[in-house]
């Protein structure tokens, strides 16, 4: 902080033009000091935590990584948190690769290889992170369709009647409900499948 109370941290595009929070500054600075092998291992851990969400296995991997490379566990945690915030905010704000590189250059004074590595990883992971952000935004307001399975079966007889001889399409819809995976199975007659086909044709047109 300067004498006026304003932050001296660089202003980043991923932060909406505001000063970078200390967690990002510290995380990137620490990451830049590590050798390339450790940087790659830390990125793998970061990627798993960002795409898979919290998982006990990530903690075990982090502890093993810290022990193998003889680095303080707190430094590893802070670095992963800082990088996760940097990459996540960059994806959320739809930063281009060039903009992400410009932000990194403000954070890393002398680390061309570090910048090059992180830029390449950001370019590859950004589409996946954007899809996750979109899914979360949809889930904020209700259930989200995630997939389907189907089969066709013939109904010949039932307690309500015989010689029905009708083909039925059974669709099982998978959806996410507040982070929980659920399924709903529906049965469709040929007529109702026709209605679905008409609906999809209108959307496609």
Image (cartoon, rainbow, N blue to C red):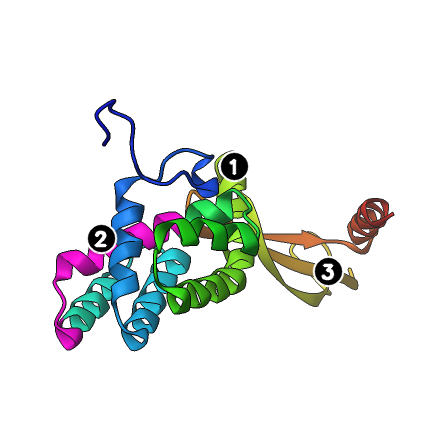
Quarter of the picture containing the N terminus is top left
- In this view, the residue in front, 180 or 123, is 123
Q: Nearer the viewer, mark 2 or mark 3?
A: 2
- Percent across and percent down for residue 34 are 25, 68
Residue 168's mark? 3
Q: Secondary structure at mark 3?
A: strand
Residue at the (42%, 53%) spot, across then down:
104
Magenta highlight range: 67-86
Within 10 Å of disc 2 (Cα), the crowding (few <14, some 14-19, many 20+) is: some
Q: Which residue is mark 1?
A: 142
Horizontal arrangement in the rendering, residue 190 relative to residue 62 (left or right): right
Residue 47 at x, y percent in the picture? 38, 63
Q: Are marks 2 and 3 in contact (CB under 8 Å)?
A: no
Q: State the residue position of label 2.
A: 78
**Disc 1 versus disc 3: nearer the observer:** 1
Residue sitting at x 70%, y 67% = 153
Main secondary structure of the magenta stretch: helix
Q: Is residue 154 left or right of residue 185?
A: right
Measure how far apart labels 2 and 3 are at the Cα level: 56 Å
**Of label 1 and label 2, which has the lower sequence position?**
2
């Amino acid at each position: 902080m300067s004498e006026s109370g304003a932050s001296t941290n660089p202003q980043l595009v991923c932060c909406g033009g505001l000063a970078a929070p200390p967690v990002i500054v510290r995380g990137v600075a620490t990451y830049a000091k590590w050798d390339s092998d450790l940087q790659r291992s830390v990125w793998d851990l970061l990627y798993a935590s960002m795409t898979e969400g919290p998982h006990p296995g990530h903690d075990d991997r982090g502890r093993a990584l810290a022990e193998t490379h003889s680095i303080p566990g707190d430094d590893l945690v802070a670095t992963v948190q800082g990088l996760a915030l940097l990459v996540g905010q960059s994806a959320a704000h739809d930063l281009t690769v060039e903009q992400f590189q410009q932000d990194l250059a403000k954070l890393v004074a002398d680390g061309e290889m570090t910048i090059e590595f992180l830029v390449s990883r950001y370019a590859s992971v950004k589409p996946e992170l954007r899809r996750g952000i979109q899914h979360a935004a949809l889930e904020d307001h209700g259930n989200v369709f995630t997939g389907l399975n189907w089969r066709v079966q013939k109904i010949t007889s039932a307690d309500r009647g015989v010689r029905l001889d009708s083909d039925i399409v059974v669709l099982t819809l998978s959806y996410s409900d507040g982070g929980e995976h659920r399924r709903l199975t529906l049965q469709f007659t040929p007529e109702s499948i026709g209605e679905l086909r008409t609906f999809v044709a209108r959307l496609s047109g």
